Amino acid sequence: MTELLLVRHGETDWNAELRWQGHADPPLNARGREQARALAEQLRGERFDALYTSDLRRARETADEVAARLGIEPVPLADLREVDVGEWSGLTYAEIEARWPGAERWHVGETPEAMAERVVAAVRRIAAEHPDGRVLLVLHGGPIRAIRAAAARLPYAEHRKADPAAAGNCSIHGFSCKSGEFRSLD
């Protein structure tokens, strides 16, 4: 069994402004950098066999802060990215509604289900590479939700309806993975 600790990146200005980020690459803001430092302090003394991160800047900056404290090198992976929201990137809900009234889908991006498949497959590969290990992953809200859905054995959309709570910035979520199956440790 592999123990996985999933962490959402620190806050960006776009998080604070409730803007869709997707594959956009805004940096952490001052509050996000402080959250990352607090996370690093919280994890001080913990042992991890590996640290993986989304290759997007907000996740990498968070992972770098933790890595410096733990003395471990982060491995960036594009497969751990947030869902690609296409034309919605950088927009608020109000701006999206004004441009595309009644829109229910991302425009020119990937579906949440495709993102979930991508992320779940990547995290399964990571777990298989570290059998009986302990791995820290710095991700985004959507990918964390994808692993929560997989642990609940529900399709992504169904899980989102059943559990609409989003992961907070720098929140920690524990899972185990054995034979490709996830189980929540929270």
Image (cartoon, helix red, strand yellow):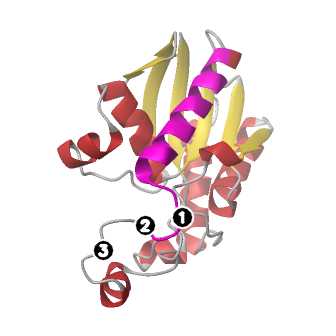
* Residue matched to label 3: 103
State the residue at coordinates (66%, 69%): 25
Residue 112 colored magenta? Answer: yes
Percent position (x, y) of residue 111?
45, 54
* Residue matched to label 1: 22
Picture quadrant where residue 137 is located? top right
Residues under numbered marks 2 and 3 in contact, where contact means CB atoms less than 8 Å apart: no
Which range is magenta?
107-128
Pick the front one: 175 or 45:
175
Picture quadrant where residue 69 is located? top right
Residues under numbered marks 2 and 1 in contact, where contact means CB atoms less than 8 Å apart: yes
Which is nearer the N-term, disc 3 or disc 1? 1
Report the quarter where the C terminus lies: top left
Q: Relative to 58, does residue 125 appear above or below in the rendering? A: above
Query: Is label 2 in a helix, a strand or a loop?
Result: loop
Which numbered disc covers residue 106?
Answer: 2
Which is nearer the N-term, disc 2 or disc 1? 1
Q: Relative to 72, does residue 184 appear above or below in the rendering? A: above
Residues under numbered marks 3 and 1 in contact, where contact means CB atoms less than 8 Å apart: no
User: Farthest residue in the bottom direction?
Assistant: 98
Q: Overall secondary structure of the magenta stretch?
A: helix
Q: Amino acid at mark 2?
A: Trp
Pointer 2: residues within 10 angstroms few (<14), some, or many (20+)?
Answer: some
Mark 2 or 1: the one toward you: 2
Which numbered disc covers residue 55?
Answer: none
Q: CA distance from mark 2 to mark 1?
A: 10 Å
State the residue at coordinates (55%, 52%): 38
Q: CA distance from mark 3 to mark 1?
A: 17 Å
